[in-house]
Image (cartoon, rainbow, N blue to C red):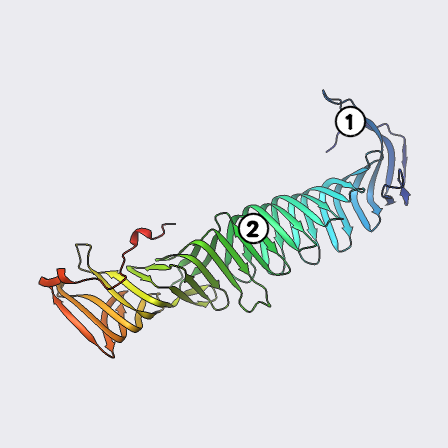
Amino acid sequence: MLGFFFVLLLIVPQVTHSQSPRDSTERVVILDRANEISRGTFTSPKTKTSPAISEPIRMVSGNVRFIESTTTVDCDTAVQFLQSRKIRLVGNIVIVRDTVTIRGEEGFYFPDERKSILERNVSLTDKQVLLNSQKGVYFSDIKTAYFSEKVSLKDTATLIFSDSLVYFRNEARALVLGNVIVTNLTDNIVITGDYGEHFTNDKRSFITGNPVLTKIDTTLSGEIDTLIIRSKRMDAFRSESDTLPRIDIIDSVRIRRGTLRSRSNKARYLLQKKMIVLYENPIVWYENHQLTGDSIVVELRENGRQNRIDKMCIYRRAFLASKASLDTSGRKFNQISGDVMVLAFNEKSQIERADVFKQSRSLYYTSDDGKPKGANLTSGDEITVYFQNNQIQSITFRGAIEGMQYPERLIDRVQNLPNFQWRESEKPTD
């Protein structure tokens, strides 16, 4: 609150339609109504660098309204500085111009600049957004707002929180800075980061500065299952008219969900189709399996907040590898490769089967009564692999089958399939 020295001159009841122009270049401000009015002088404190300065003021209280052109300013009490031409506002402040309404508990209005500076429970509403914060500055002529401290922005599709925000009404665009949280109002997805921009009309936004996407769900057994995606940039497209609502995830993508981990250069989360597409050097680790290919599609089956992995498709140079169960040397890996691979999962998100198409090959280490028995190297047009508890149980080959069996005594002659690489050291830990 301001501290000032008053020389009280006059107190009168309800006053209306008083104005205070100083010259033709200044905007006309009309005191439309007030229950009480008094006049006085405000003297600023003297400091080491500036002398005390006095100027005339007008103090009004009770049902106060000022009018400046198309702007109305309502509050409980106000002090109008007649020389510096600013108005101090306190209590239930409502400033309206055109379709914009600004609210707060205390602050200033500068009529010549058409600038509002408000504090405590500040809000701005128009036909497009609702902004809230503890501090706000709004320039009516250039239609730009600067908000800080516990900022939120809400439109029909998105709710955003941040430390500070700049909103350009002409562009329906917001810059959000510091502890940014973007929430879609129709799903469970939250994206956090250090900086972002939101385009209200287009219903799209992007986040940079260590963005993290989080989606909290439950499994069929009722356990919490959280999807976490990290990258360097995320672009969310959520327009109702968009034929492909999606989140594009760019640069150094890392995904974690349950025992699933993945890396890729880029990814795309298709919201309506409930699938995540990984491309540009993708790799997925699931349980004890490693999957690679030119692109990998993870399909989700959702039922409310309960969801699971339903299918995983690997396109071009598909490769599945896993450590042989009885291996102690660290050199034996079961391997399956082909042009296309489709993995089906059961209700517990365990792999049930894998179908491999075109140029299919497998290297499988066998055992008998818990002892290593050797390895089978086989190729065919198509392969179907059956799993139990995420472990290979049997393999079926179809078309142009060729194979070779190695007994355990010749196991050192076995060579890995082409393009095999065990990359467990690259598995994300965050």
Q: Can residue 109 be seen from the camera position used here? A: yes
First of labels 1, 2 by sequence position: 1
Mark 1 surroundings: few (<14), some (14-19) or many (≥20) residues within 10 A:
some
In terms of depth relative to the viewer, which is nearer, 43 or 403? 403
Q: Identify the residue at image location x=79%, y=40%.
A: 77
Residue 305: percent from left, percent from top: 47, 63
How far separated are the C-alphas under marks 1 and 2?
Answer: 41 Å
The amino acid on which the numbered mark 1 sits, given as a three-letter code, is Ser
Number of numbered discs on residues = 2
Question: Which quarter shows the N terminus?
Answer: top right
Q: Can residue 15 be seen from the camera position used here? A: no
Q: Identify the residue at image location x=52%, y=62%.
A: 187
Residue at the farthest left position: 409
| Residue underneath mark 2 | 196
| Residue underneath mark 1 | 44
Residue at the farthest front position: 418
Helix, strand or loop status at disc 1:
loop
Above or below for 185 versus 25: below
Residue 307: percent from left, percent from top: 43, 65
Residue at the farthest bottom position: 399
Q: Identify the residue at image location x=69%, y=50%.
A: 124
Q: Nearer the viewer, mark 1 or mark 2?
A: 2
Q: Identify the residue at image location x=64%, y=54%.
A: 173
Residue 157: percent from left, percent from top: 60, 60
The amino acid on which the numbered mark 2 sits, given as a three-letter code, is Gly
Residue 342: quarter of image: bottom left
